[in-house]
Amino acid sequence: QVQLVESGGGLVQPGGSLRLSCAASGIIFSIYGMGWYRQAPGKQRELVATITSGGNTNYADSVKGRFTISRDNAKNTVYLQMNSLKPEDTAVYYCNDRRGGTIFGDVWGQGTQVTVSS
């Protein structure tokens, strides 16, 4: 069964940067498109960015130009580089397959908290 472990969150000031990591196990990581998602308090989980198995990327309009998704198949890890962070980026960030978890059977990790505040 797939396991997803997110890390790298924290408290950062507006305009700052963070790099999130998600280590996957239990799957042949290289063949799957992956995605980063976030859920703010009182809101539904939303898609932030996706990357295909071939490395093609897509971003939500709200993060385009500020966030970069990447992957290292040798490490079974997907990353999210977040720059120019804004208070509205505050949320718990999760990784999963790029179809919202439907490929991996709706298995989610614990997420990593990102708080953007002065």
Image (cartoon, rainbow, N blue to C red):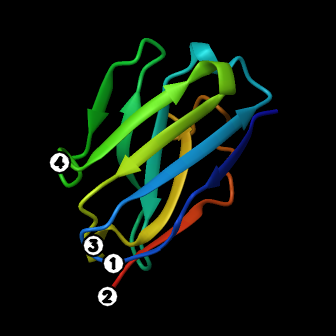
Going by the numbered disc 4, the residue's amino acid type is Asp
Graded by Cα atoms within 10 Å as few (under 14), some (14 to 19) or many (20 or more), the crowding at tag 2 reads few
Q: Secondary structure at mark 2?
A: loop
- Residue 92's place in the image compared with 76, above or below, is below
- Tag of residue 118: 2
Helix, strand or loop at label 4? It is loop
Element type where label 3 sits in the image: helix
Query: Where is residue 103 shown, x and y percent of the image?
Result: 60, 28
Label 1 to label 3, Cα distance in Å? 12 Å
Residue 51: mark: none
- To which quarter of the image does residue 90 belong? bottom left
Q: Are marks 1 and 2 in contact (CB under 8 Å)?
A: yes
Residue beneath disc 3? 88
Residue ID at (69%, 35%): 24
| Numbered circle sitting on residue 13 | 1
Image coordinates for residue 89, horizontal then vertical, percent? 32, 67
Circle 2 or circle 4, nearest the eye: 2
Residue type highlighted by circle 2: Ser
Left/right placement of residue 108 relative to residue 62 reads: right
User: How many residues crowd mark 1 within 10 Å: few (<14), some (14–19), many (20+)?
Assistant: some
> How far is mark 2 from mark 4, CA to CA?
24 Å
Q: Position of residue 39 (x, y in %)?
A: 45, 65
**Dot placed on the residue nearer the N-terminal end, 1 or 4:** 1
Mark 2 or mark 4: which comes first in sequence? 4
Residue beneath the point at 80% across and 28% down: 26
Mark toward the start of the polypeptide (2 vs 3)? 3
Specify the quadrant of the image occupied by residue 110.
bottom right
The image shows residue 61 at horizontal and vertical percentages of 17, 48
Horizontal arrangement in the rendering, residue 12 relative to residue 26 (left or right): left
Give me the disc on residue 61. 4
